[in-house]
Amino acid sequence: MDWGIKIVIAIAIFVVGKMLARMIVNLLDKALRKTGTDTMLVGFLCNIAYSVLLIAVLLAAVDSLGVNVTSLLAILGAAGLAVGLALKDSLSNFAAGVMIIIFRPFNIGDFISAGGASGVVDEIGIFSTLMHTGDNQRIIVPNSAILGSNITNASALPTRRIDLVIGIGYDDNIGQARDIIMTILNAEDRILEDPAPAVAVSELGDSSVNLNVRPWVNTGDYWAVRADLLEGIKIKLDEAGISIPYPQQDVHMHEIKAG
């Protein structure tokens, strides 16, 4: 009966303590947000605080069973080295998460490419970073993989340059094609005047003369403007009779007469 009562008390301590830990973390979250603390840092600190409180609740529950917590902590401390070696990857991810928070190569809501994945950052956890792709798939990337690779942050700067390569036929007029494309660029309100857009010959390809089309836009307009430009350039070049040639290869066949 005594052990039964102790077990019930331990379970009650754990359940109530877990609820209180969640309430304290929620209050901490609200308090940090009211002070204007960065969202990324708030989430990271709350995760750590919840983990610490949950460990304290677990120790309190174990203590209610009559287990010597001091001895238990000593045993856990002695086993800490072995556990640390076994979980070295997790500790590496934790350290990488701290470094990401300190140096902030990206923020919540940024579109990044890192650790072999690309997506919008939703959360930076203790061990991993959560992102979602354009088609709304969840990606969970270990923090060490992100910190140990090149990080491309497409949202870090306010403006971006659109790089298009438009091919025209060798028989077409380059000046006419350039004027048509420049007219389209000048008519697009979302394209910035400074830096000015540019159209120039980049390459005499195998089957086309390639033109570089390089306008600048606000980062948020990048994909929409890019798609509209591709469609508009194709339509206007077709109307002017300027071809956008397919890759092609000439094959010459020679007849050899039998001797």
Image (cartoon, helix red, strand yellow):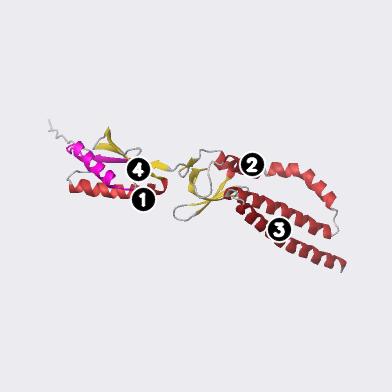
Looking at the image, residue 135 sits to the left or right of residue 148; the answer is: left
Report whether residue 179 is seen. yes
| SS at mark 2 in the image | helix
- Mark 4 or mark 3, which is nearer to you? 4
Secondary structure beneath label 3: helix
Depth order, front residue of 159/163: 159
Q: Are marks 2 and 4 in contact (CB under 8 Å)?
A: no
For marks 2 and 1, give the CA distance: 38 Å
Q: Amino acid at mark 3?
A: Ala
Q: Which residue is mark 1?
A: 224
Residue lying furthest front: 35
Tell me the residue that label 2 is attached to: 95
Q: Residue at x 60, y 43 (%)?
A: 101
Q: Which residues are magenta?
A: 162-189
Residue type pointed to by label 4: Leu
Residue at image coords 79%, 59%: 61
**Residue 21 has which mark?**
3
Mark 2 or mark 4, which has the lower sequence index?
A: 2
Residues 215 and 135: in front is 215
The image quadrant where one finds the N terminus is: bottom right
Q: 259 and 160: which one is in front?
A: 160
Q: Position of residue 127 (x, y in %)?
A: 62, 47
Task: Say which residue label 4 marks.
Answer: 192
